[in-house]
Image (cartoon, grey):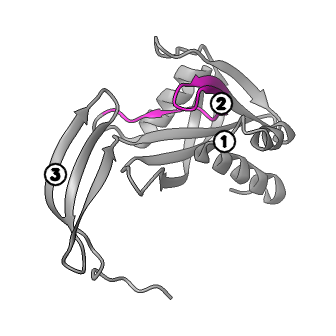
Amino acid sequence: MLKKTDEFRELTVSTKPIFEGKIISLQVDTVKLPDGGTATREIVRHPGAAAVLALIDDKMLVVEQYRKPMEKFQIEIPAGKLDAGEDPRVAAARELEEETGYSAGKLRPLSAFYTSPGFADEKLYVYIAEELVQGESRPDADEYLNVSAITFEEAQQFIKEERISDAKTILAVYAWQIYRLTGEI
């Protein structure tokens, strides 16, 4: 069993801001190591994000969009960043409606995780949408999305083809698989 310990904690000696952007900031921290030495840590600060697993008639709502960092199109569950101080549930509801046009009568938490804890503090909250009502999508001005409802078999194939390759969407597909097998998430 793992024990809780502070013996390997790194203490911040100094922080140097490098970049402040619209979505992220980057800093370089100098830290004191447990053995007394020092090292640098490049840290991306991010406000966090929320995502939604929305199922309609045993199909999952997804958006397909171009992802510039990877230089390819990706199929993902609806998601977006948190505004400053925003409740993740509110962000999840907003992103579902903006990106797909659907609103949820109920959102239940599924999971929350850090996307890349080795260099970033982004925490992503995933919700399950229930009691869906169709409306009109309102993507952001710089968002170009194709909205679809895909079958479980299509989702599995898209994972194999790496058209689905982000952690939040893969987690959603596995949660959906558990739901299909057990009736519960």
Residue at point 25%, 78% (across, down) = 34
Checking the image for residue 15, the label placed there is 3
Q: Kindly state the secondary structure of the residue where label 3 is placed.
A: strand
Tell me if label 1 and label 2 are in contact, CB under 8 Å. Answer: yes
Q: Name the residue under label 1.
A: 165
Residue occupying the far top of the picture: 141
Residue 67, horizontal then vertical, whole percent: 56, 27
Q: Residues within 10 Å of mark 2 (few under 14, many from 20)?
A: some
Q: Which amino acid does label 2 sit on?
A: Gln
Q: Name the residue under label 2.
A: 74
Residue 114, horizontal then vertical, whole percent: 45, 54
Residue range corresponding to the magenta coloring: 63-83
Give left or right: position of 111 versus 35: right
Q: Which amino acid does label 3 sit on?
A: Thr
By secondary structure, the bulk of the magenta-drawn segment is best described as strand
Q: How crowded is mark 3: few (under 14 residues within 10 Å), some or many (20 or more)?
A: some
Q: Which of marks 1 and 2 is nearer the N terminus?
A: 2
Q: Kindly state the secondary structure of the residue where label 2 is placed.
A: strand
Q: Distance between the residues labelled 1 and 2?
A: 7 Å
